[in-house]
Every structure is written in C-alpha cells, then in structure tokens.
Image (cartoon, helix red, strand yellow):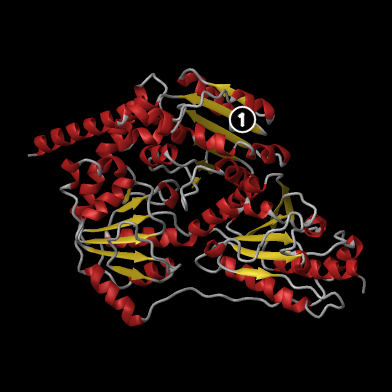
Amino acid sequence: MNHQDLLTNYLSSFIQTLYEHKVRHVVISPGSRSTPLSMLFEAHPDFTTHLDIDERSAAFLALGLAKASGKPTALVCTSGTAAANYYPAIIEASLARVPLVVITADRPYELQQVAAPQTIDQTDMYGRHVKQFFQLEFSEHDLSLLHYNQAMASRAVACAIRTPQGPVHINVPLREPLVPNLLLHQVNNNAHGVTAAPSVTQGKLSLTVNQLQELAARINAAQRGIIICGALAREARSSILALARHSGFPILADPLSQLRRGTHEQKLVIENYDLFLRCHEIVSCLKPDLIIRFGTPPVSKSVKQWMEEQECANLVIDAGADWRDPACKATHMVYCDEQYFCEHMLSQINQNVNAAWAASWQKINALTRSTLQSIRDDSMLSEEKLFLKLCEQLPEQADLVVGNSMPIRELDTFMFTSSKAAHVFANRGANGIDGVVSTAVGVALSKGRAILALGDLSFFHSMNGLLAAKQNQANLTIVLVNNDGGGIFSFLPQASEETYFESLFGTPHGLDFSHAAMLYGARYTKVVDWPMFDAAFSKAIKEEGITIIEVPTKRRDNVRKHQELRSRLVKRFKEVNSVED
C-alpha cells in the first residue's frame, strides 16, 4: 500500500471515529501541513465544516459552537504558531468546561529540532489547560496501528465530554506528500471505517445512602437557607427549581443559570441581588443559616462579598469534582451529580421550611426591581437603560451572547425574571474580553441567529471574527456599547488616581467603528436617541447577515447612575420599613 493510501486510511478511520462519538462540527483554518485533515473533513458527507482564516478567532468560534450545541466541536490547524493561537480559547474552554477536540497538524519526527520551517514543539503545548494530550501514530508499511488510533480517538472524545467537560489535544505528525486519496476516503465513508471503533459508556457521580442522609439532616436543620446558582448543566435546572419549591429556599439566580427566563415557576427566583446586597442597611436582615451552591461562581461581586460575611454551613454541589470556592467559604464540597443530588433530597428534607424568610427576600427583590425600572424614563443614552431595554425587547427563545467587564454586569443587574424564554452565553471561565465576537459567531451558526452585546474594547480585540461571520453567513446582531475605553475601571479604586487613570486604564481610543462595518460588509447604525435604537434593534433581529448597532455612552455617567440607583434603593427601603414599624 502506497503512502497516499496509508495516509488516507489512517485519517479516514480517525475522522469517522470522531463522527461515531457525536462530533458533528469542525472549524478549519487553512494551512499546508493540515491539508489531508482539512480535505478529508470537508469531503466527509456528515460533518459541518466552518472556515476561519485566523486560528485565534477559529478557536473561539468553535467554543461558541460547542457552548450552544452542548456537543464537542473539533478544530483543525497547521503546525507551528498557528496552534499557539488556539491557546486563549483553550484556556476559556478548560475553565468553563466546554468540550473541544483540538487537532493540530505537525511535522514528522525527523523534522523536529532541526530548524525545519513552521516547526515548534507541540507535545503537551497546552499544558494543564487541556484534559489530556494524544498523538496519532502511523505505520509507513501497513495498517497495523489503525485500531490503536481509533481507540485513541474514542478515548479523546470520551475525555472531552466526561464531567467536568473540557478540551483535549490531538497532535497529528504528517509526512509529505500530503494530498489524500479522496476516492478511497469515499469508499471508507461508505463502509463506515475499516474496523469498528470502541464505544465508551460513562456514568455520573453519586453518593451513598448514608452520605445523602447526613446532608439531608444538615438541610433539615436550617430555617433560613439560600440557594446560589451560576451557570448550570441543562439537565440540573428543573431539579434545582424543585428543590427550592420543596424547601422554600430562595434562589439567587445568575443570568447564566438560565433560571431567570422561561415558562418555569419563578416565585423563588431572586434576580436583583447585585444591587441590594451592596447596601449594608439591607443585608443586615438577610442572615442565612445554610447556603447551597450549584454551578459556576456567579458574576456578581456583591454575592461573593456577602458570602464572605456569612458564618453558616456552605455546601458546594459539583458533578465535576473541582474546587469552585473563590470566596473561601465552603464548609462541604459535595462531589455529586447535581440532578441526582436534588432528586434524592426531595424525598428526605422538610417541606417549605420558613415562608417568612422567603417572603423577606421576595419583598426586597421587588423593591429593588421597581427602583431599577425607574430609569426607564431617562432620555439620555446610558448603559443601564440600554440593558433594561435590551432585555425587554429580546425575542422569544433569543440567544444572547454578552461580553465581559461591564456588559455582563449590566445584564446581571437589569435582566429581570420573565416568562419569555432566552438563553444567555458568556465567556466566564477566564473572564477575558478577547474572542467574544467569534464566540457569538459560533452560537449564531449553531442556533441560526444570535444577539451580541459587548463593549468597544472587546469588539476591538475580536472584530476580525466578523470575517468568519461573513464567510459562514452567520445571522448576528451586535449591540456595541462605545464609551471610548475601559468602562469597568471607573468603578475601581484606581479611578481616583486622575494623573494616570486615563492613559493607563481609561485608554480612550477614538475609533470610528463604521469603518469596521464597511470592511466586513455589515449594516451599521450609530444611534443618537432611544427611538432610533428601538427601530434599529427591531429591524436587525429579523434581518439576515451582520448588523452593528453602536450606542455611545459616557463612562463617568455610568458610575454616577449606579451610585444614584443604590442611594435611591436605600432611601426607599428605609421609607418602607419606617411605615411598617
């Protein structure tokens, strides 16, 4: 068997094994050494391929696809620094538990460490940010390593999707000539591979009967329990809601928990905590005797600070067996599938423990919501009102991607509970501002359409992702908040150092983003008032292709508005309490 046929058989069986393990999307960046991988993925009838010229953008696009689909997504690039450009998205995928199958072409062994062009050491190049490193092996004479590679591919995908999910790295050293036999590849596809790949069956973490009983007793001893939810596994949401209903414990629901929007019962869902937990006059009456936490740490800094002040049992339920405790307040790490935990607790814990406790949270939440809604009458363009309006105008089943720094925090503040379903995505693993546009493109390609809300610096960092959006015909509405710099720094202590603040932190750029829209063929509107925004947004979410709606705001106004809302809430809280007294 000649080299071309050997190469084709090895890679065809490898690619078919990925398909058999539910990989359906692959993001390809062009390159010479990856030629056989790219061509054989493209020629496979059942893979959806997406081309992205820039590897850094491509990796975040794959991240978005995997987040939105819940399935592992493959990435393919050539050798050398192309692979290094995957690193930021791999870090995000690792920390956010997103399954990626990262496939890097490489030079063969004889070209390593001899100054061959486009050659770097790719062995374990992503370190601990991938769950495992694998390398494809080839025989120059026969197909004796075929089943080994299939087993390795099965193992790699199983590793990526095993809880906690995350990226894996498969390195593929390839010798020239690199063009595969496409006719043989077609024959292999029709035969579903030369040999069958091993299947993998995986279970979920559970607890013993005694462990469940001990935890149930601890929960039963509580009269003032609270549940805190970050981003959650989809299958755990309904079980957590059922646990809250049964126990009467309120839920502090992060926007990424997906508990704030939908047709499920939201009576115990508390969403306005970020503002009222900043008010010492209010939090003094909110002292829990038990905290149960599910999912990722919440976006809100005030939740973390509030938890740090509490002296009570603090249970972290985590199917991924990580140490998710940035507040350093966990008293019990419970490594167990979240759905399993909730369903077993329902039959063992007391029902509706303390109605007055839940009512106090609901009352403060309602007061905070009406205070926040008071900005609806403001005529000036502001980030606060923008996110209030954006959440109100989201279409049913909207897929919303939110940038880091201020946008995700504004969403946390102004996304109220609603029966209108929406799904929120954000890169909160490493919390970086890079790659957000490409992540949104991935979500749009998976879901058919997406809305992206982000700041000007995030847009600048990742606007080259718009090329992939254009080439892959993504339907993407971008709401670009332009406050000419890093808005979040205005909320931090360094804002008081006026001598250095603007040059080092405020970083005004003065960019005209209409030119970026023109470069990538996007429709563009820069709004001057709210009626103009309403009209532009209403039109954009129905149109095909890319639309950018720029909303200019002022950083200092943003800080002032948040301070005003906090003062207004404290005043109203005191007035209500004084009337009741």
Q: Quadrant of residue 249?
A: bottom left
Q: How many marks overall?
A: 1
Q: Position of residue 198 (x, y in %)?
A: 69, 78
- Report whether residue 225 is seen: yes
Q: Position of residue 499 (x, y in %)?
A: 34, 27
Residue 318 in the image: above or below residue 55: below
Q: Which residue is at a point 55% across and 64% down the rendered structure image?
A: 127
Q: Position of residue 190 (x, y in %)?
A: 85, 67
Q: Disc 1 designates what residue?
A: 547
Residue 510 in the image: above or below residue 194: above
Quadrant in the picture for the C terminus = top left
Residue located farthest toward the front when viewing the structure as drawn: 114
**Amino acid at the residue labelled 1:** Thr
Q: Position of residue 204 (x, y in %)?
A: 49, 73
Quadrant in the picture for the N terminus = bottom right
Q: Which residue is at a point 70% across and 55% down the rendered structure image?
A: 80
Q: Is residue 28 left or right of residue 530?
A: right
Seen from the viewer's position, the closer of residues 545 and 576 is 545
Q: Is residue 189 left or right of residue 467?
A: right
Seen from the viewer's position, the closer of residues 329 and 140 is 140
Q: Which residue is at a point 16% across and 48% down the rendered structure image?
A: 285
Residue 558 in the image: above or below residue 312: above
- Report whether residue 258 is seen: no
Local packing at callout 1 (Cα closer than 10 Å; few below 14, some 14-19, many 20+) is: many
